Amino acid sequence: MLVDLCVTEVEDLASNNFNFAAAPSAHPYPDDTVETGHVKILEAKSLRVQFDRQCSTERRHDPLVIMDGSGRVVSVRSGREWSDWSIELTIPGCELRWKFTSDQSVNGWGWLFKVYPVMASHDDSFHTKMSDRVILSQPAFELSKILLDKLRIDGVDQKARLGAALAQCCQLCFLDSSHRMWALHKCRRIITKSGSPFKCAMSGNQVKAVLSSLPEALLKQYEYEEPIVKSVKHLMHSELCRAYAALACDLNLDCKLCVGTESHRLSWFQRYCDAARVAQALVDRTSKYPQSFIDQINRIIAETEDDYNNVNPINSQQLHCFSLQQDEQLMNWVNLRADEWSVSWLSHGIIYGWGHNHRGQLGGVDGAKVKLPTACEAMSILRPVQIVGGEQSLFAVTSEGRVYAMGYGASGRLGIGSSDSVANPTLIAGLQHVFVKKVAVNSGGKHCLALTADGDVFSWGEGDDGKLGHGNKASLDRPKLIEALSGKGVVDIACGGAHSAAITANGELYTFGK
C-alpha cells in the first residue's frame, strides 16, 4: 500500500504541467531601441533561463542584460554564435529583470528565452522539522523519494509505472537538480535490473512513455552542452548528460535512433554505444562485442594487409575473451611506447588564419589583411575534420557531418540561401539532413560540391557551363542533390574552374561542365 502511494505521488508530479514564462524580442529587432521587462513566478526557489538556438544580436553593441529581482546584473548576452547564448542561467529567487538595448547599425534575428521555476527541495525541513504541518505543506515528491529509497518494490506493475514516471520527472525543469538526478539514477536501476518489465518486454504504455521522452531529452541536453565542451569552458559533459546516454544505451535505443534522415544528429551516440559495449565486454571478459566493432577490426586488417583481397574476415566466434595475459601485454606496451598512447586534451588544436580577410573569409579573425598567423576561436570551437578554401570563401566540415561557410557570398557560393557575405562560420542549413564527408571547391571558389556518407553529391554556387550537374546553367544559393549521380555510390569529388568530377566505388569517372 505504501509503495503504491509513493508511485502514485511520483506519477502525479510527472503529469503536472508547470507553465514557463517566455520573453521574446521582435524578429528581427529594430534599431535604436531600449526594452525592459521582468518575470516573476511565486514560490520558486530560483529561476532557470534557457535561450533559443536562433538568438543572434550584434556583439557588444546590442546587449541583453539579465538581472535578479534586486537589479543586480547576473549576465550580459550578445553575439551571433550559439556558444554566446548556450550557457544556461540560474537566477536566485522568484523574480528576474531584463533590459535590451540596440544601436543604430547592424542587427540580427533577436533573442528569445524561457524561464522555468525551480521549486524548493526543503531537505532541511524534512530532517529537522518533521511536524504534520511541515510535511503536509511540502511537495509530496520529497517524502516519496525518501520512502522509495528504503522500501522494496516487487510488483511488476509498480516497477513499470515508477520507471515511466521517473523518466518524465528527470526532465522537469521546475525540479531541483538533485531531485532530477535522483529520478534518473533510480529510473536506470529499475529499467536495467534483471527481470525488469522494461528489460524483458519492451511494450506497454509505460515503456512507450520512456522511449518517447528519453531520445528528445538526450539530444536536447547534448546539443546544449556540446558547444560548451568544444570551447573548453567545461572539460566534459555533465553527469546528467552522461546518465541520459547510459540509460539510452542500456535500452538499445541506438538501433532505433541512429537510422533514417536524422541519424547524423546522433552519430556521436552510436560511437558512444559501441565504445561502452566494447568496454563492458572487456570488463566482463566475454566475447560479446558489437558487430560494428568487428567490422571495424576487419577494415583495419584489410587496410594493413598487402594482399587484402585474400584476407578472411573474422567473426564473433573467433574473438576470444580478453585475458589477464593480454592485460599485461597492453600495460607493457603503454610503459615501453608511451608516445603511441599519449593524447592531449586540446588535441583538436587551435586553427590559425592569415592573409586577405576583406570578405571575412578567415572566419572571425579581425582585420582586412592579416599578416601573421592569428588564432581563430570561432573555427577552433567547431573542431573541423576538413577545411577547404576557394576565392574569398572558406568551408569547414565537422566530425558530425555538418558544413560551415564563411566569406564572399556572390552567386550563392556559400550555400546559405543568399548572396550575402558572412564573417563568421555559418551553418549550411540545406545540408543538415545528411552527413557530409567531404566538400570540394576550386581555388576560384565560385561553386562547390559536397559528398555525403551515403554516396550522394550536392552542388551549389555559380552554374555557368553546367558545372553544377543539374542539366542547366542556373546558379544556386542552396545545396541541391545531383540526381544524375544518385545511386552511383560516389566515393570522391573534385571541382575545377569550369567543371566538376566524381568517382564511384566501381572506378567510374563522371564529369560535367566545360
Image (spheres, rainbow, N blue to C red):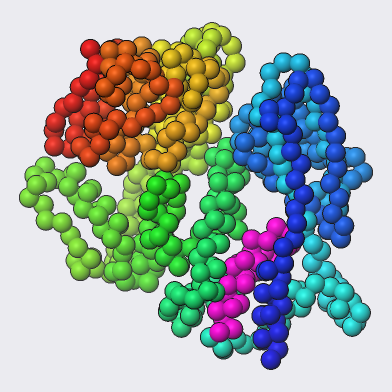
In this rendering, position of residue 15 left or right of residue 451? right
The x and y percentages for residue 212 are 52, 63
| 155 sits to left or right of 393 | right
- Residue at position x 65%, y 66% in the image: 169
- Left or right: 400 in relation to 363: left
**Residue 287 x/y as whole percent:** 28, 69
Picture residue at 56% right of the left edge, 89% below the top: 154
The span picked out in magenta is 157-184
Q: Residue at x 45, y 75 (%)?
A: 203
User: What main secondary structure does the magenta stretch of the protein show?
Assistant: helix
Residue 181 is one of the magenta-drawn residues: yes
Q: Quadrant of the C terminus?
A: top left
Residue 457 figure quarter: top left
Q: In what quadrant of the picture does the N terminus appear?
A: bottom right
Q: Is residue 440 above or below residue 463?
A: below
Q: Closer to the camera, 161 or 315? A: 161
User: Is residue 423 highlighted in magenta?
Assistant: no
Give above or below for 11 relative to 119.
below
Q: Hey, which quadrant is residue 451 in on the image?
A: top left
